[in-house]
Image (tube, rainbow, N blue to C red):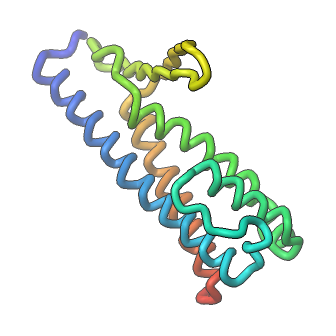
Amino acid sequence: MALSKAKRKHRLNTLFERIGDIAVSWAFLEAGIDGCIYQMHQRWGGKSVMATIPLRSFERKVKYLRGWHSSDTRWQILFPDFDETIDRIERMSSDRHRLIHGAIKNLPEYEDDGFIVLRRTLEMNGDKTTFEEANYNLAAIRGFRRDIVLTATFLGQFASILAGHAD
C-alpha cells in the first residue's frame, strides 16, 4: 500500500534523525580511537610508529592503530582480533561517509521501501566523476548505529586498559 504524504514525511524525518544519530555516535567512536592512540603513544611505544599523534586524518589514525598493533607482540597475543576490529571500523567509516555526505536519491513510496543514497566522488587528478549508490532502510541504519556504539564502547574500554585503569 502506498504511503500517505504524512507517513512519507514522518519516515523522512525519522531518516534524518537516524542520520543525526550516526553523526553523534561516530563522534563517540572517534573519541575512543583518539583515546586509544593517546595511550598507545604515551605509554606503549607508539612514538616508534609515528613521531606525532595523528589528530585529524581518519586514514592516518587507522594506519597508526595498525602499525602500533603489528609492532607489539604482547598486544597481538592479548587482542588477536584487533585488525578485524580496525577493518570493521573502516567499513563503518565508508557507510558513515555515504550516509552523512550522500544525497537521498529516492523517497519511499511504500512501507517496505528503502532509501537509495547517492554519493558523488571526484578524482583529484583529473576530471573523472563517479557515482556510488547504496541501499538503506530505517532498520539497517538503526543497526548500523548500534554497531558504531558497541565498537565505540569497546574502544573506550581498550583505552582504559591501555591507561592502566581497567578493573
Tell me residue 19's x, y (percent): 34, 40
In-front residue for pair 101/76:
101
Could you say which quadrant of the image residue 36 lies in?
bottom right
Left or right, residue 15 beside residue 83? left
Left or right, residue 66 beside residue 23? right
Q: Reply above or below: 141 against 108.
A: below
Q: Residue at x 46, y 43 (%)?
A: 143
Q: Residue at x 70, y 84 (%)?
A: 43
Q: Residue at x 64, y 47 (%)?
A: 88
Q: Reply above or below: 35 against 98.
A: below
In-front residue for pair 81/100:
100
In-front residue for pair 55/98:
55
Image quadrant where one finds the N terminus: top left
Q: Residue at x 50, y 59 (%)?
A: 30
Could you say which quadrant of the image residue 63 lies in?
bottom right
Tell me residue 25's x, y (percent): 41, 54
